Image: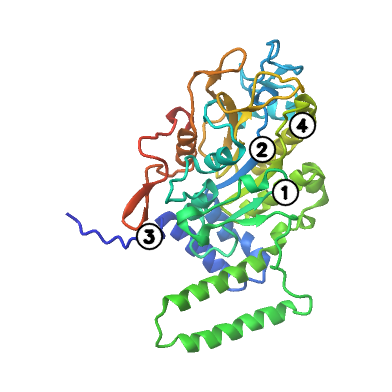
Amino acid sequence: MPRNTFCGSAAHAIDRRALLGGALAGAALASDMTALNALTAPDVSKALKTKQKRVILLWLAGGASQLETWDPKPGATTGGPFRSIQTDVPGLRISELMPKMAARMKTTCVIRGLNTKNGDHGSAALTMMRGRRDEAALRYPDLGAVVAREFGPTESKVPDYVTFYTQTEGRSMAPGASGFLGARYAPMELTTNNYPEFIKKLDGITDLDHLERGELRNVLGKGFEKGRNSDTLNSQNEAYQRVRGIMASEKLFDITQEPQKMRDRYGPTQFAEQTLIARRLVEAGVPFVRVGRAWWDSHGQNFETHQEMVPELDHVMATLLDDLGERGLLDDVMVMTLAEFGRTPSINASLGRDHFASAWSCTISGAGIKRGSVYGKSDPKGNTVVAEEVDAGSLFATVYSALGLDPHKNYYVGSRPIPLVNPGVEPIKALVG
């Protein structure tokens, strides 16, 4: 029997593929981290396209209605005023509020059979970011932290995990969290604007000053390190290089770097601008970006709310998928739409829909998902799942599998093995293609 050499660290067992990709990217970036164009060097771009999967999550905070988006029920008493329209996938119809996505459903998988059994904003949001509930003494990493851990190159100089949530409603209910994976994979959270605070060098410091100060530090540091072997020193050096790298990536957050034609293509809204930044980030190697769009909690005036918000989602999502496809990135970048739950088929006295977790929808596009597919079916009024029910665990197992990860891979907390999904949970094989 082979000797067990596991050290008990959650950072143990670095994936070889990620290590090789990270070494290549790191070598290209290490020479001068003040030059952003190093991020788009040919060898780095090739490494990103062949070694690293990435995810953009469009988080529909508050719970978008499946009936006004992906699973319309026109003509039913619960259906509301909007029609359904045919998509480019035979037999698949979605809401008339989404004509642009109707022409692009061949890129996308719709899951209509979500039954997650939790209609509370806070705890449901935590579950739908993690795929399971925390234990009393164990905090699980969310999807962003896991993707960052698995696909963030070891020597990466760009952020591992970025989340935009600049609206105030519901922000505290779904914070990013790295759980037992530790602070290395915690998100960079942007809550006030589209630009990270405190990463821009002072105006009085030129690029040459910045470069020379870094070189001086390296010379002094190497002299100090001689004859010393210290985890503290190694950690400090890693943190310094990470901060320096993130400072060099500041222009990734600046959409004025994009041609005006591209900015016009996405549109002027905050959601559109943040999604464009998300594309810039994943193209540069950031493994996971979440773009939060609030607030879909339409207990009153549901139809007016969705008539305003769904067309924006339709336009931005369609533009993102087109943009990724044109750049050759759609095979390696997954785009998800997800919320904490959906909305009730029943319409309340305020012409609203309430919280509903029994039969709702999400979408997955790109990467290794089976495109142009539909999984799950709700009854004619949308009250229950009548075929191919999906819970949070199996959804996450499917996402991991489509990204090329074994959902039963173990992390370790001390000597305890912790798989990516709970024991017994399996991916939906029909959707991984």
Q: CA distance from mark 3 to mark 4?
A: 45 Å
Return the mark for residue 311.
4
Residue drawn at the location 43% of the way across and 30% of the way down: 429
Mark closest to the chain's N terminus, 2 or 1: 2
Return the mark for residue 274.
1
Above or below, comparing residue 286 to residue 355 in the picture: below
> Which of label 2 and label 1 is nearer to you?
2
Circle 2 crowding by C-alpha within 10 Å: few under 14, some 14–19, many from 20? many
The reply to whether discs 3 and 4 touch (Cβ–Cβ < 8 Å) is no
> Which of label 2 and label 3 is nearer to you?
2
Residue drawn at the location 52% of the way across and 75% of the way down: 237
Above or below, comparing residue 373 to residue 163 in the picture: above
Q: Is residue 103 visible?
A: no
**Residue type (three-letter) at the residue carrying disc 4:** Pro
Circle 2 sits on which residue? Answer: 60
Circle 3 sits on which residue? Answer: 12
Residue drawn at the location 66% of the way across and 16% of the way down: 73
Mark closest to the chain's N terminus, 4 or 2: 2
Mark closest to the chain's N terminus, 1 or 4: 1
- Which element carries disc 2, helix, strand or loop? strand
Circle 4 crowding by C-alpha within 10 Å: few under 14, some 14–19, many from 20? some
**Residue type (three-letter) at the residue carrying disc 2:** Leu
- Which element carries disc 4, helix, strand or loop? helix
Looking at the rendered image, the quarter that the N terminus falls into is: bottom left
**Residue type (three-letter) at the residue carrying disc 1:** Gln
